[in-house]
Image (cartoon, rainbow, N blue to C red):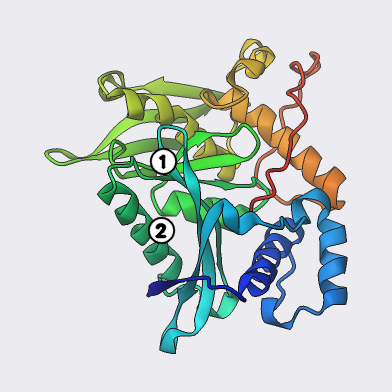
Amino acid sequence: MRLRAVVEGEERRFALWDLASLVEGGLGEVVDPDALTPRAERGWREQLGESGREWPGGELYRRRYWILGERDAVAGTVAVDNWTKGPSQLAVSSLYLRPHARGRGLAAAALDEVYAAATAEGLPGFRLEAHWSWQPAVRYYLRRGLWVVGWKRSLSFARMPQLPLHRVREEDGRLLLLVADRQRGWVPILAAGQEGRWLRLDETADYRGCDGWVHEYARSTLALYLALAGRPLVRGPQWWAEAWRWADAGEPEGLAARIEEFERAARSRAGRTVVSPYRPVMLPEPAPPAFPQLADSGDG
């Protein structure tokens, strides 16, 4: 695997590959980006609405690359912004592979290359976004060991030198979040179980002794694992009433409320039935205060 920069004259083709990614993620349809006619492109962009807009001059704000596969054939895309996000991380977007090129490690290698380039420049890794309704992408990023660092407008993932590898294991009906330790191997730091229809979230002594980065993002990361497993994210009515406090990241109740916002926005924007494993909270009490209306970033 290697990357090749998009050169002058290839901007239009890259935009169509970006569109193919949006169509698959947002509408669940697989299209061949190199076979899109102007009429088909117009139709897909109309269905996608704001999220399907083409952004003329976008090349001024990010560097775009082709992911090359066998015989140097174009197999996918990735882009890196010209500025950093969060704690000076590279912002990654437009990660996409044609279906026949998947399962060969090309996306993982592209992310590894971006990470190596970032850390070589002294930057703390990279950050990327994924919509909740893009279930395959969301699950892929967790499998790659990325940490969940936010959910303000979409799910935000990061890979940083300060964050160790992590994994989740099910044990006695609970999900355990474990982190890699050089001396002790895999160490559990959080455990999530269920009491009736509510979540029970327990900390270990190791969690309380974690450094600030792990301590900050562990709960957000485990919350997403729970949502993907169809487990409860709410510890009770009082926690749910205060879900607005974690509108950007943090406690699992914040993610529960955000997922409802994400799915509502996807249905209204594309008229698509969102298929996900998470079940919304059903309470007789009034719902928590609504978050500000989601704005689409337009990223692929």
Residue 36 is left or right of residue 152, and the answer is right
| Viewport quadrant of the C terminus | bottom right
| Residue 46: mark in rendering | none
Residue 89 marker:
1
Examine the rendering and report whether any part of residue 198 can be seen: no
Q: Of the residues under marks 1 and 2, which one precedes in the sequence?
A: 1
SS class of the residue under badge 1?
strand
Q: Viewed as shown, does residue 171 lie left or right of 196?
A: left
Vertical side of 100 occupied by 21: above or below: above
Q: Residue at x 68, y 81 (%)?
A: 34
Note whether residue 209 is visible.
Answer: yes
The percent position of residue 44, horizontal first and vertical second, equals 82, 65
Left or right: 233 in relation to 25? left
Q: Are marks 1 and 2 in contact (CB under 8 Å)?
A: no
Give how far apart the Cα atoms at labels 1 and 2 are: 13 Å
- Is 171 above or below relative to 11? above
Where is residue 229 drawn, in percent x and y?
A: 56, 44
Q: Nearer the viewer, residue 96 or 237?
A: 96
Q: Is residue 138 placed above or below 21 in the rendered structure?
A: above
Which of the pair 70/169 is nearer the observer? 70
- The quarter of the image holding the N terminus is bottom left
| 201 or 103: nearer the viewer | 103
How many neighbours does mark 1 have within 10 angstroms: few (below 14), some (14-19), or many (20 or more)?
A: many
Q: How many marks?
A: 2
Circle 2 sits on which residue?
111
Q: Residue at x 61, y 75 (%)?
A: 10
